[in-house]
Amino acid sequence: MSRKYFGTDGIRGRANGLITPELALKVGQAAGLVFQRGDHRHRVVIGKDTRLSGYMIEYAMVAGFTSVGMDVLLLGPMPTPAVAMLTKSMRADLGVMISASHNLFEDNGIKLFGPQGFKLSDDVEKQIEQLLDEPIDRRLAQSASLGRARRIDGVHDRYIEFAKRTLPRELSLDGLRVVIDCAHGAAYKVVPEALWELGADVIAIGVDPDGFNINKECGSTSPEALSKKVREMRADIGIALDGDADRVILVDERGHIVDGDQLLAVIAQSWKEEGRLAKPGIVTTVMSNLGLERFLEGQGLGMVRTPVGDRYVLEQMLTQGYNLGGEPSGHIILSDYATTGDGFVAALQVLAVVQKLRRPVSEVCHRFDPLPQILKNVRYRSGKPLDHAEVKSAIMDGENRLNGHGRLLVRSSGTEPVIRVMGEGDDRVLVEEVVDQIVNALGHAAAA
């Protein structure tokens, strides 16, 4: 069954386009009914990021949940991993994060977490989808059984304490000058405060949300502002989160960007040395650089690849028993601590290595030289260009030419009519030729 509303990370789209108050109300009702299991008083926690449409969606969801008899605890702006953690900690039946992650303010989304803080399975999302298109008037709560809603204080402190406990008690960030870019998003209060409590000299940018500026020329998807600030302030490290703080990109003292693959290499090697890896390897996606795979091999560690999306990374981690996984985009999952990607906790693990080694971040966070990687997108209007004979032939030819010296990945986007062509290998010129040949074939197929 193809899904009508849910994508790879909840429901996401233009605010007041796809994500309307009506839809938010229905999602509250449908999810509330699916998660009413047992005779106890059911409760849901709702967090959000800082975009303007968050108010509209939050109140619509409150109406939906209370109308089916669920009590609602409102957290206000909080990172996605904090909402997942608090769902479990507060013994809620369901958690909701209202966010479109790294998208600009015009979009918004609804992410749902089960009682253990994990994102929902495909089967549960399908149950919710089914209810969204059915009349549920007869399943609404009786007047005396309607839910209540209230705002919860002190949740920032709970997340700060949780994050600090992921580090050894004796570890301090004294002597480190840290620039933190919160993307004018959900972490704008908690993360600078947590870094200060850990002893860092903190310079915070991206901490003045106005409803419109989330992720705008800032945060993990636009780290140029952070690079500039790190050089200007002669800081030791820069940390860039995205709008809901479930991903992170670092910047070294020279202003150079450190992506998720390098972060995974740093944490994997550190955890291996400390005996903290649950299995000798990590989980990442098909987008991770071949350089990372070769580095891990040199450390005696394996690498399991999954389709793109942190939910698939987590799924493999849970089924195969790994406790470290992530994506080049900076979604890092540390399952000993969190049930979803947590940009801040991942950054803390790297800061711990920096403090332990007492070496510059440019040295600590350069574990391998990435292979040249080229990614090109081909937009199409209709049809299935990947089924075209010329395209299949170009892909087969490209794989033969890269055989043993690189990797080729051609896939359809899950969110738009775009085909992504990614090639990487030791020889940049060869990789470019292979990618361009496939892109040309796709162009002919799309125009046919």
Image (cartoon, rainbow, N blue to C red):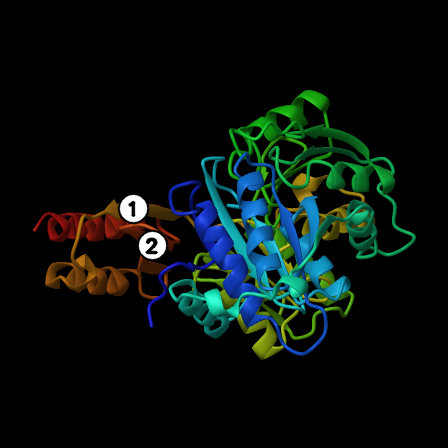
Nearer to the camera, 442 or 243: 243
Q: Would you call the spot at circle 2 few (<14 residues within 10 Å), some (14-19), or many (20 or more)?
A: few
In the rendered image, the vertical position of residue 350 relative to residue 174, given as above or below: below
Query: Tag 2's secondary structure?
Result: loop
Amino acid type indicated by mark 2: Ser
Name the residue at 40% across, 58% down: 5
- Could you give the CA–CA distance between mark 1 and mark 2, rounded to whole angstroms? 9 Å
Amino acid type indicated by mark 1: Asn
Occupied quadrant, residue 94: bottom right
Which residue is the extreme one toward the front?
143
Where is mark 2, residue-wise? 413
Where is mark 1, residue-wise? 377
Nearer to the camera, 107 or 101: 107
In the rendered image, the vertical position of residue 368 relative to residue 284, given as above or below: above
Residues at circles 1 and 2 in contact by the CB criterion of under 8 Å: yes
Any part of residue 328 in sight: no
Residue 213 % position (x, y): 55, 29
442 horizontally vs 114: left or right: left
Query: Tag 1's secondary structure?
Result: strand
Nearer to the camera, 396 or 33: 33
Residue 236 % position (x, y): 73, 34
